Image: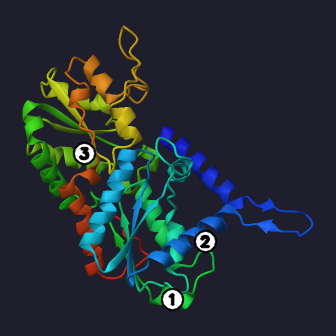
Amino acid sequence: MKTIKHLMIAMMAVCTAMSFTACGDDDDDKVVENNYTIYQNTVNQTVKTQKKNSKVILLVAFGSTWEQAYNAFDTTVQAYKQAFPQYDIFLSFSSAICINRAAAGENVDPRNFYAPPFWLTAFAQDGVKYSEIVVQSLQVIPGEEYTRVINYIKDFANNANGDLDDQYLASVSLKLGVPLLQDADTDVPMVAQALNDLYAPQAADGVVAFMGHGNPDAYDTYKANIRYTQLEEALQRLNKNFYVGTVDMKDNFKTHVQQRMVEAGITSGKVYCHPLMSIDGDHGHNDMAGDDDAWTGNGYAYNDEGEVEDTSWKMFFSRMGYTCNNSTMIEKGLLELPTVRQIWMNHTREAINGEALDYYHSKNPE
């Protein structure tokens, strides 16, 4: 439920930023531009300055405030530039919290990331007007955050603010690249095979537990949480020592992963933990590999959903009798794994080669 709270705070931050105006000297009755206009002008100038092609790809990530994540995003942008030389490549964050904290320099030097609507508007400005716009979701599952990506495109295509050229919007080709685990029949087994190829040695030495994000039931858009269960099933067809849990999916917390391990007869041995997220950010460093531990000396207090709060995966599995410590933490996001990143890039290629997006009927999973 922390995710919901953070999103509400983020929405408040965006509204505050967009509504803020400052007055100058009363004598000249000067009004300083609000933050929304400043951001839009900045992105407009960035796009105009860097435009080299007639087509563009916008990568949309949730965001982060960790240097390792920034490096993963930078590497991904470079990989896209090499793979799609006829397209300009830009990166956007969808999380207002991540955007604001990145600009404030939390954990790392300040960097400016902007929300997708600023970039889409910049792509449609006079002097730019890309003929083709491809929006690539860097989400793992087609869940809540992917819904936001779809809505950004819909609002843009429908000229939600009424300030874009309708004639241009009627002619521009809009494409959407889907999340990593969009399709259960093709994407799930492909990701499972890529992960097995990478981590078969660890799975031969112990359990490899992947930690995804997931959505609470009320926010499980398109019932996308099932992709984690499907991925575990696909992985276990390759090796029974693979498990997939989450930080926010009901009945699939770390406690449930450990329960499934016990049911399979695995009550000791090594547990390797790996983020099943696009980047190794706050969840990876803290929820998975952190030192938080709510152990009381007599055990853990489980909440009403069966989860142990304020305790990392590392500490929990260690307390449960497994060898799980800093040496068994595999701290890499999925974008850092070239063979997994390639699956996202395959989705981009499929979008480019497919028909223009029917944005009135969003590209939802079945």
Q: Contact (CB < 8 A) between labels 3 and 2? A: no
Q: Label 1 belongs to which residue?
A: 168
Toward the viewer: 153 or 69? 69
Q: CA distance from mark 2 to mark 1?
A: 20 Å
Residue beneath the point at 32% across and 51% down: 278
Disc assigned to residue 229: 3
Q: Which comes sooner in the sequence, label 3 or label 2?
A: 2
- Residue drawn at x 51%, y 43% as measured from the top left: 106
Q: Is residue 223 left or right of residue 113?
A: left
Residue at the far right: name it.
Answer: 27
**Where residue 7 sits in the image (x, y, percent)?**
54, 48
Residue at the image position 29 percent from the left and 68 percent from the top: 80
Q: Earlier in the sequence, mark 3 or mark 1?
A: 1
- Residue 5 % position (x, y): 55, 41
Quadrant of the rendered structure where residue 34 is? Answer: bottom right
Residue 179 in view (yes/no): no
- CA separation, marks 3 and 2? 44 Å
According to the picture, the residue beneath numbered tag 2 turns out to be 41
Whether residue 359 is situated above or below residue 302 in the rendered picture: below
- Percent x, y of residue 29: 88, 69
2 vs 1, front mark: 2
Q: CA distance from mark 3 to mark 1?
A: 43 Å
Mark nearer the viewer, 3 or 2: 2
- Kindly indicate the quadrant of the structure image that contains residue 142: bottom left
**Mark 1: secondary structure:** helix
Specify whether 331 is left or right of 44.
Answer: left
